[in-house]
Image: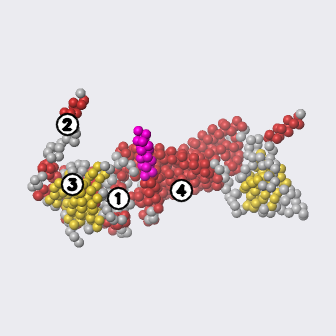
């Protein structure tokens, strides 16, 4: 086989692999969103984070706008503090917005639902490093069952 | 009696360490030698063809089938929980994290690794390596290095192709045949697959496996007893040792990457 | 420059536990065909590899043009090897290259000559061994004799000063044997080479060699011109030259007395 044909086939092979990589990166992993340059950071305190994990999505009406970057325990109050990275694309949430920990389906993963609040003249927009104060914790199934039984009696 | 056994254990240990050292030296000689672009590049391209392009078919076919099997098996389990929407992440994560790199490495060891061992063993048996050395051409540079680098470049590429084809295979069975919603197949995949954690880690695994398989295959060939039995034995050893080494390294890498 | 091409001094070499050479000395004169003969399995190929620096002796020294091969650094050794060349028993042609590319291989590796000049050189060398017409064949398409001639063309491609032949006559039919004999002698005279021929084919060696060493039992047992060797008084030398089955080298491998072993079974 002559070397031109070999070079051609090797070129096709490498191009094929690069194409497959882009499929994996953009179609499968949805890259380009979690990059570090185009996000800003918000904080939120919860009483109980349930099954929330780093990298869980933050959604507004089902649309992913960011991800959980880290979860730490506040040493003073012993409450979990969640660090969020929100895409710069969505930088006009008011400070009255609230966060809820939700579950996708009965057995699905938990994610953060961001509920944009009202806006008037006295309300500022959330900036990099701000704290979202209005939060609702995760439903814990055991507590729910306990409540249900308690109420029946 | 006991002393004899301990002594034999010691001897075996020393031998394997010496073998490892020899392999490492050979590898270093091949890898860190200063490359000659004018002569090296055509050799590398030729070997990319032999090692990479010729392995493509087996990778495509097996990737497709493994993806289809994952789609079928995953569906039958997930549908019991009404969670067939999670089929996408199941297929994608299994392939990206484990099956893509590992199965590619195993197939590669069987297809390209054994062929390389046999080729180099035969070159040794027919005195081609010796005669090259007498012509003042270093066989490590001329024979080993291009094959090594071709393998190290090819294997991650093959693993990427394998994974992509496998995900399409899962789509074929899950969506086109069993009726999982195409939108939820892709969107739940995108929500659960992370570029760094899953895609890049899988590629890193594959690169490590490539080094391991190529080092074993080339060393076994170079070290083969130059007879037909010797070459047959070396070829078998390449497949067995390389496969076991890939699985062992896979455990270590998985523990490092996903265990924490 | 002295007229000694290779000077082997007091060479001792063992492979594993087996001693192969024990204090052997040998000299190869420039411009001559020196033959090394001996029974099979005494490590004649090993000797050539020692001269080529592929193996290192346990003791003793090997001088090539006055410089010690075992003491050379790797780079020096590779430099030195460009002026020597070895014809392997099997030919050792590179199986993935055509005859032309095989002969061109050392030229392409060691020079930066333009392709047109390389072509001329290769065709010259192929012409010398009578294979100019076979240049596009692959090594697998050649007969044993042709493969050896092609390998010879490759060995002389860079005009070496020393050429070593490993069993050049083994397994050849009488005609190709005759061709090889003629080539060795002619190349030696025409190119001013120095040749070392390792062989156990007595008649052919005696017909072309200027000087012969007879090696057996880890050392040189006889040396001289072919004529001197025929007159040698040692029974070992005579047995080898005449090819007698039994004599100073016993027919039987070392063993316990036959009668004893037969008795053991009973």
- Residue C108 at what x, y percent from top left? 36, 64
Q: Chain of mark 3?
A: C
Figure label count: 4
Q: Secondary structure at mark 2?
A: loop
Residue B173 visible (yes or no) = no
State the CA–CA distance, disc 3 to disc 1.
29 Å
State the CA–CA distance, disc 1 to disc 2.
48 Å
State the CA–CA distance, disc 4 to disc 3.
59 Å
Mark 3, Cα crowd under 10 Å, few <14 / some 14-19 / many 20+, is: many
Q: In the rendered image, which residue does mark 3 sit on?
A: C219
Q: Secondary structure at mark 4?
A: helix
Looking at the picture, tell me which residue is in the foreground, C32 or A150: A150
Mark 4, Cα crowd under 10 Å, few <14 / some 14-19 / many 20+, is: some
Instruction: Determine whether C47 is above or below C76 in the image.
Output: above
Q: Chain of mark 1?
A: B
Q: Are marks 3 and 1 on the same chain?
A: no
Residue at the spot 76% in from the left edge and 41% down from the top edge: A106
Residue B11 lies in the magenta-colored region: yes
Residue A88 lies in the magenta-colored region: no
- Residue A145 at what x, y percent from top left? 82, 38
The mark closer to the camera, 3 or 1, is: 3
Q: In the rendered image, which residue does mark 1 sit on?
A: B132
Q: Are marks 2 and 4 on the same chain?
A: no
Residue at the spot 70% in from the left edge and 57% down from the top edge: A33
Asked if marks 4 and 1 touch (Cβ < 8 Å), the reply is: no
Q: Chain of mark 2?
A: C
The mark closer to the camera, 1 or 2, is: 2
- Residue A63 at what x, y percent from top left? 76, 52
- Where residue C257 is drawn, which disc sits there? 2
Q: Are marks 1 and 2 on the same chain?
A: no
Q: In the rendered image, which residue does mark 4 sit on?
A: A14
């Amino acid at each position: 086989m002559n070397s031109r044909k070999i070079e051609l086939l090797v070129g096709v092979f490498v191009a094929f692999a690069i194409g497959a990589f882009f499929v994996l990166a953009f179609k499968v992993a949805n890259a380009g969103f979690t990059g570090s340059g185009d996000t800003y950071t918000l904080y939120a305190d919860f009483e109980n984070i349930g099954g929330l994990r780093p990298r869980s999505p933050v959604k507004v009406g089902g649309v992913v706008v960011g991800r959980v970057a880290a979860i730490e325990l506040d040493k003073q109050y012993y409450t979990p503090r969640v660090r969020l990275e929100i895409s710069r694309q969505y930088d006009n949430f008011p400070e009255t917005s609230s966060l809820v920990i939700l579950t996708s389906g009965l057995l699905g993963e938990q994610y953060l639902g961001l509920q944009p609040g009202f806006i008037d003249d006295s309300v500022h927009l959330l900036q990099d490093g701000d704290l979202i104060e209005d939060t609702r914790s995760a439903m814990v199934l055991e507590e729910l069952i306990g409540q249900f039984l308690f109420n029946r009696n | 009696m006991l002393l004899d056994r301990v002594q034999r254990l010691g001897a075996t240990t020393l031998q394997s360490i010496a073998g490892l050292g020899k392999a490492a030296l050979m590898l270093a000689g091949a890898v860190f030698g200063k490359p000659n672009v004018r002569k090296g590049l055509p050799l590398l391209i030729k070997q990319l063809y032999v090692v990479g392009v010729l392995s493509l078919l087996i990778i495509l076919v097996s990737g497709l089938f493994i993806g289809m099997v994952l789609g079928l098996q995953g569906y039958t389990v997930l549908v019991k929980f009404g969670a067939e929407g999670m089929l996408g992440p199941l297929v994608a994560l299994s392939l990206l994290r484990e099956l893509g790199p590992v199965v590619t490495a195993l197939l590669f060891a069987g297809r390209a690794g054994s062929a390389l061992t046999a080729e180099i063993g035969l070159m040794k048996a027919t005195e081609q390596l010796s005669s090259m050395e007498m012509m003042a051409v270093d066989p490590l540079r001329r024979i080993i290095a291009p094959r090594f680098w071709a393998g190290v470049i090819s294997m991650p590429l093959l693993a990427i192709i394998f994974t992509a084809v496998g995900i399409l295979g899962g789509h074929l069975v899950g969506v086109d045949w069993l009726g999982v919603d195409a939108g939820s197949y892709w969107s739940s995949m995108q929500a659960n697959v992370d570029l760094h954690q899953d895609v890049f880690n899988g590629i890193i695994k594959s690169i490590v496996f490539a080094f391991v398989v190529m080092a074993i295959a080339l060393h076994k060939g170079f070290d083969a007893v130059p007879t037909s039995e010797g070459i047959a034995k070396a070829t078998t050893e390449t497949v067995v040792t390389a496969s076991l080494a890939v699985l062992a390294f896979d455990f270590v890498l998985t523990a490092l990457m996903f265990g924490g | 420059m002295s007229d000694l091409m290779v000077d082997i001094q007091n060479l001792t070499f063992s492979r594993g536990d087996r001693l192969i050479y024990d204090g052997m000395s040998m000299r190869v004169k420039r411009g001559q065909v020196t033959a090394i003969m001996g029974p099979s399995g005494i490590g004649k190929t090993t000797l050539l590899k020692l001269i080529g620096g592929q193996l290192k002796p346990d003791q003793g020294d090997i001088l090539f043009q006055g410089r010690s091969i075992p003491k050379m650094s790797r780079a020096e050794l590779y430099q030195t090897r460009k002026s020597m060349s070895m014809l392997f028993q099997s030919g050792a042609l590179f199986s993935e290259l055509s005859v032309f590319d095989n002969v061109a291989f050392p030229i392409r590796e060691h020079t930066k000559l333009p392709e047109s000049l390389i072509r001329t050189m290769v065709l010259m060398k192929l012409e010398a061994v009578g294979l100019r017409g076979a240049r596009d064949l692959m090594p697998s398409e050649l007969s044993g004799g042709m493969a050896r001639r092609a390998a010879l063309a490759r060995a002389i491609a860079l005009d070496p000063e020393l050429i070593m032949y490993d069993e050049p006559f083994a397994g050849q039919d009488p005609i190709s044997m005759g061709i090889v004999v003629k080539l060795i002698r002619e190349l030696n005279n025409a190119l001013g080479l120095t040749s070392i021929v390792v062989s156990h084919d007595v008649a052919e060696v005696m017909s072309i060699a200027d000087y012969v060493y007879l090696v057996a039992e880890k050392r040189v047992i006889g040396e001289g011109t072919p004529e001197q060797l025929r007159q040698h008084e040692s029974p070992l030398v005579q047995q080898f030259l005449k090819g007698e089955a039994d004599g100073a080298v016993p027919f039987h491998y070392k063993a316990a007395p036959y009668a004893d072993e037969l008795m053991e079974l009973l």
